[in-house]
């Protein structure tokens, strides 16, 4: 036997040991169908026949190392009751065994006497991945402190070198068994489930994802007569802290338990697992607490090939809990009895809110799933308090029904109840009309985008439009043609025209084509003012978006006016803490920052961030945007440690939620590198900027505004490191693209000219420096006042030059004029 053959056999044995005994034969049949001898060897080892084992060990082809490894895998367990570890932990009996190792009940004798659970890696499984996974579980438990999470007490190794750790012994039942045994009602089950969710939320706040949540890992014990859940077995947990590798996430390895794993876990090609995978598993546990069954009967599917089983988990939708109970008349009586009710009442309890809550937790698309266990808890609490749950479209008739249920005493009279019914009927008619109108608009928009935008990629559509055939049609070209086709096409459909122009305008904005975006959005605002009115949320959203575009173009006075108007109107129409109101609030604070009004910017942005964190949570995109804006204010104020802390927090969340190459993650990387640069940590800044630039070139293209920002930032770091040739090369390349894409008069172009002047000054080329700085000021460069600030650093070599003195005076005049212009916005 060659070492290669041994590696194959050992791999098969390890895989088989991770499976229940009744599934091993099927796995070997599937894997070894073309190699009967390989299957025979594996089956022989699994059977642990002494004669076969002895012959195999005597094989001259085995090295001592291979023979030792085989002995450890196939020899009888070297751990037995009565053994003492670390002089104070005596094994009593084995509680369980899995693919990773064993769990023993043990007696701790010092410094306190108590029963504990001792977990150790299986003998012969000491490869690097398993040891890393074991160590990570120990670290995961050690940093968590929550009543619903089993505590870790100690750790060490056995005399044979097996790692172990000692944790709280939880002599409880799985949460589903406990609830059935106690015949808990639905409300009591939900209150117990909430405690478990709070434990998972605590783990997430410590950057730990469990990834194997199921009833067997949520045990219930009684403390002072009250049930308390304890979450155990973080062996499949994934560390989400930036820089740490995931635990046991090699492609091709199945991590989790079929039937409880999320669709993304069931995808063998997925590496992007975040906290929402635990939300899905909690949804399965909730489903079982309500119905007594899992959404999918994986036991019945045990004979299916693994890939087919995983496909079902990824693609098929589960029945609602109420349908699950009503469809199985054989078990519905027992299920209802375990919940202290009858089948009809149980189905009635589940139908509606609990159906919607559970199915939202089980969404295949995690973008539509609850974003955190705390959000799932909040919706369950709303249900328990007869509030309107967020898992349901917030129609007025639905809210009216909830209102009536909560305040039924006050609404007991027939007249009041009739009033509610009339109001609900009126709103229902209005919503029906509005829904029909919005459906018509959506259909028209979809038709336009399909036939006038996307179809341009085809040769026939290009021929009809009299355009030159272009097999590699660019998005910009297609957008320009589609924008031209809107004119006059929807004269009698202003809402359709507004929706189409809004889509095109936002696409232009995402591409950094602000003049084109502005043209479309100005028309959208005009149309929506005429058709919907100024108080309509869509109109105000467009106004705020137009303010953002104006800010990006350097038109700060106009941007401030638009954002101020939008924010004030949204506070009146929507309320001060609605997401769209808060969006305009943080955008206005951003304009203040760009205008140099840093104190106002910090105060407003701090207020916005506080509300956003409370209302939407720290992971919400609006909250992260506000954090980023506030960090920028701190940078401009010189409060670099505060800025660094915010940017590092943003980057950690972006990586966890969006992935390492998402544009927003890259923006967070770029911002953090900027702070490193300003703190003088140039090697760290250069490494982070270089990484960001490479990804942006590949993902966004060489001429995208974000790519240009990375070029400029990296050039700045080179300049601070005295790598002047590299800095000038990058600045020159950046300026060429900026002049072509944004125009020579743009603030970004002027900034780059100014930076080139600084580099020339530091290189001792005074004439070139003066020429570039003059060009920068003549273009109305917003950082003109910075010329004075830079005298002691980049421009020190020009300090005594009379031309430079005059230039500084000119720059300050430009800055003063700009300050006055932005302080007095011209009314529209």
Image (cartoon, rainbow, N blue to C red):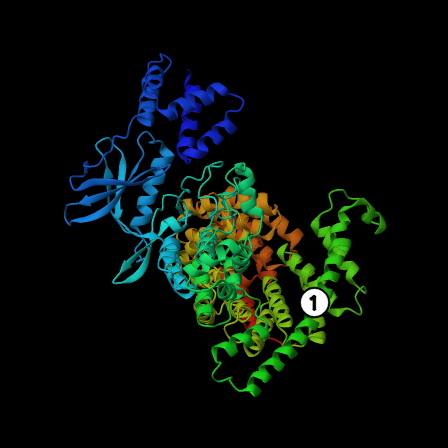
Question: From the image, which quarter does the N terminus lie in?
Answer: top left
Vertical relation: 664 (above or below) 269: below
Residue 443 appears in view: yes
Report x, y in % for residue 488.
Answer: 81, 65
Q: Is residue 725 left or right of residue 550?
A: left
The residue at which mark 1 appears reads as 438
Residue 790 appears in view: no
Q: Is residue 471 left or right of residue 369?
A: right
Q: Nearer the viewer, residue 65 or 499?
A: 65
Vertical relation: 58 (above or below) 793: above
Report x, y in % for residue 816.
Answer: 53, 70
Measuring 67% from the left and 77% from the top, which residue is drawn there?
533
Report x, y in % for residue 646.
Answer: 42, 58
Vertical relation: 697 (above or below) 788: above
Q: Nearer the viewer, residue 373 or 113?
A: 113
Q: Nearer the viewer, residue 299 or 397?
A: 299
Vertical relation: 559 (above or below) 330: below
| Number of marks in the rendered image | 1
Question: From the image, which quarter does the C terminus lie in?
Answer: bottom right
Q: Name the secondary structure under disc 1.
A: helix
Q: Nearer the viewer, residue 274 or 568?
A: 274
The residue lying furthest to the top in this view is: 60
Neighbour class for label 1 at 10 Å: few (<14), some, many (≥20)? some
Measuring 60% from the left and 80% from the top, which residue is drawn there?
421
Q: Quadrant of residue 395?
A: bottom right
Report x, y in % for residue 329.
Answer: 53, 56
């Amino acid at each position: 036997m060659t070492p290669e053959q041994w590696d194959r056999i050992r791999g098969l044995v390890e895989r088989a040991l991770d499976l229940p005994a009744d599934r091993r034969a099927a796995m070997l049949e599937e894997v070894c169908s073309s190699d009967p001898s390989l299957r025979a060897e594996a089956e022989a080892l699994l059977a642990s026949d002494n004669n076969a084992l002895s012959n195999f060990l005597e094989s001259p082809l085995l090295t001592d190392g291979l023979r030792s490894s085989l002995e450890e895998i196939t020899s009888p367990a070297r751990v037995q009751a009565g053994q003492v570890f670390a002089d104070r932990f005596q094994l009593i009996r084995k509680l369980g065994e899995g693919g990773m190792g064993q769990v023993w009940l043990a007696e701790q004798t010092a410094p306190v006497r108590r029963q504990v659970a001792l977990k150790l890696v299986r003998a012969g499984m000491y490869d690097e991945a398993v040891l890393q996974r074991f160590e990570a579980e120990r670290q995961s438990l050690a940093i968590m402190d929550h009543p619903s999470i089993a505590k870790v007490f100690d750790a060490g190794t056995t005399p044979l070198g097996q790692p172990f750790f000692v944790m709280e012994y939880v002599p409880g039942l799985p949460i589903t068994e406990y609830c059935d045994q106690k015949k808990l009602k639905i409300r009591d089950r939900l209150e117990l489930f909430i405690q478990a969710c709070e434990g998972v939320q605590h783990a997430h706040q410590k950057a730990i994802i469990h990834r194997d949540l199921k009833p067997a890992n949520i045990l219930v014990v009684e403390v002072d007569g009250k049930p308390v859940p304890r979450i155990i077995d973080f062996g499949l947990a994934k560390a989400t802290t930036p820089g740490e590798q995931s635990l046991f996430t090699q492609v091709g390895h199945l991590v989790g338990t079929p039937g409880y794993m999320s669709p993304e876990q069931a995808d063998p090609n997925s590496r992007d697992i975040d906290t929402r995978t635990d939300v899905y598993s909690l949804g399965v546990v909730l489903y079982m607490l309500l119905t007594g069954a899992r959404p999918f009967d994986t036991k019945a599917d045990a004979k299916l090939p693994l890939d087919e089983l995983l496909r079902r988990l990824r693609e098929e939708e589960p029945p609602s809990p109420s349908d699950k109970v009503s469809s199985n008349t054989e078990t519905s009586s027992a299920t209802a009895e375990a919940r202290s009710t009858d089948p009809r009442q149980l189905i009635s309890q589940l139908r509606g809110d609990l159906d919607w809550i559970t199915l939202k937790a089980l969404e295949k698309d995690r973008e539509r799933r609850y974003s955190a266990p705390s959000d799932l808890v909040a919706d369950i609490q709303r249900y328990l308090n007869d509030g309107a749950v967020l898992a349901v479209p917030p129609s007025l008739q639905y809210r009216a029904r909830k209102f009536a249920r909560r305040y039924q005493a006050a609404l007991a009279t027939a007249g009041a109840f009739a009033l509610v019914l009339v109001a609900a009927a009126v709103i229902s008619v209005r919503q029906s009309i509005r829904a029909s109108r919005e459906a018509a608009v959506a259909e028209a928009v979809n038709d336009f985008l399909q036939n006038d935008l996307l179809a341009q990629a085809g040769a026939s559509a290009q021929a009809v439009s009299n355009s030159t055939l272009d097999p590699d049609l660019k998005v910009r070209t297609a957008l320009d043609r589609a924008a031209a086709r809107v004119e006059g096409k929807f004269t009698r459909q202003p809402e359709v025209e507004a929706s189409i122009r809004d889509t095109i305008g936002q696409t232009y904005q995402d591409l950094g084509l602000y003049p084109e975006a502005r043209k479309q959005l100005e028309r959208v605002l005009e149309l929506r003012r005429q058709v919907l009115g100024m108080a309509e949320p869509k109109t105000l959203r467009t106004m705020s978006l137009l303010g953002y575009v104006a800010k990006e173009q350097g038109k700060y006075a106009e941007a401030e006016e638009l954002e101020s108007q939008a924010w004030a109107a949204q506070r009146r129409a929507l309320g001060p803490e609605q997401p769209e109101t808060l969006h305009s609030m943080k955008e206005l604070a951003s304009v203040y920052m760009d205008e140099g009004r840093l104190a106002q910017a910090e105060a407003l942005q701090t207020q916005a961030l506080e509300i956003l964190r409370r209302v939407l949570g720290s992971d919400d995109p609006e909250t992260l945007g506000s954090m980023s804006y506030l960090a920028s204010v701190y940078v401009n104020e010189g409060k670099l440690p505060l800025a660094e802390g915010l940017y590092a927090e943003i980057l950690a969340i972006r990586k966890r939620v969006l992935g390492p190459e998402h544009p927003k993650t890259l923006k967070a990387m770029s911002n953090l590198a900027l702070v490193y640069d300003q703190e003088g940590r140039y090697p760290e800044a250069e490494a982070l900027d270089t990484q960001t630039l490479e990804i942006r070139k590949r993902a966004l293209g060489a001429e995208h505004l974000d790519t240009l920002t990375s070029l400029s930032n990296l050039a700045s770091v080179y300049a601070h490191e005295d790598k002047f040739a590299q800095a000038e090369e990058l600045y020159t390349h950046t300026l060429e693209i900026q002049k072509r894409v944004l125009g020579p008069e743009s603030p970004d172009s002027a900034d780059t000219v100014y930076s080139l002047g600084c580099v020339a000054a530091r290189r001792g080329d005074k004439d070139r420096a003066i020429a570039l700085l003059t060009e920068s000021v003549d273009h109305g460069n917003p950082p003109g006042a910075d010329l004075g600030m830079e005298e002691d650093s980049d421009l020190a070599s020009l300090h005594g030059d009379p031309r430079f003195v005059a230039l500084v005076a000119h720059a300050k005049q430009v800055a003063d004029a700009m300050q006055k212009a932005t302080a007095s916005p011209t009314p529209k």
